[in-house]
Image (cartoon, rainbow, N blue to C red):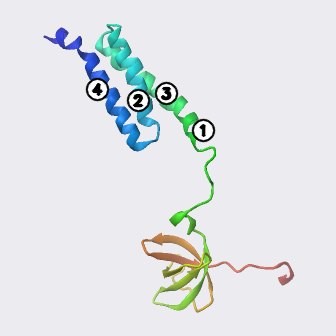
Amino acid sequence: MFPDLVQYLWIVWLCLVLLFVVIELLTLEFTFAMIAAGSLIGGLGTSLLHGPWWLQIGLAAAISALLLFTIRPLLLRTLHKGADPTKSNVDALYELGGRVMTAFVEGAGQVKLDNGETWTARLSPAHPSADLHDGDRVVVTRVLGATVEVAPAPIERTPHDD
């Protein structure tokens, strides 16, 4: 009975390849594309050449690993080559400066960021004793949902201050 099932192993490989291709279309990170290619070449190819099941699995794993560590990094680098390095959305808020709009009471207040947005703010735990008043400069350290965590901005020195 076992030898009869081995002759239909190509169907299993074909289903795996299709499954990996569908997962790749959902993730778009080239990982499952490399596994699908390894399964297609190593698993299905060896099965169609009537190789033993252990060789099919071994070749599929080896080719998938080879593709993952050689071809995938090149594809990712090529894909991200023309990407815009400008941060956007929440990522653009980190290290963004701003001014205190309402004095901080018990570590909470409002700040107007340099991008023009007004946010509810909390004082960073790294600066628990900082006293922030209207007009003080702050820097965003974290974004916590609809609240930003801020720290006092470092004092900028001009050359003639020395």
Q: Amino acid at mark 2?
A: Ile
Name the spot of residue 34 as percent of width and height, x first. 45, 30
**Disc nearest the viewer among 3 and 4:** 4
Q: Amino acid at mark 3?
A: Leu
Check the picture and name the quadrant holding the N terminus. top left
**Disc nearest the viewer among 4 and 2:** 4
Q: Which residue was labeled with disc 4?
A: 15
The dot on residue 67 is 3
Within-10-Å neighbours for mark 3: few <14, some 14–19, many 20+: some
The residue depicted at 35 percent of the width and 27 percent of the height is 17
Regarding residue 59, the answer to whether it shows in the image is no
Is residue 90 placed above or below 69 in the rendered structure?
below
What secondary structure is marked by label 4?
Answer: helix
Q: Amino acid at mark 1?
A: Thr
Name the spot of residue 40 as percent of width and height, x first. 39, 21
**Disc nearest the viewer among 3 and 1:** 1
Q: Which residue was labeled with disc 1?
A: 78
Q: Which residue was labeled with disc 2?
A: 35
Is 34 on the left-hand or right-hand side of 98? left
**Disc nearest the viewer among 2 and 1:** 1
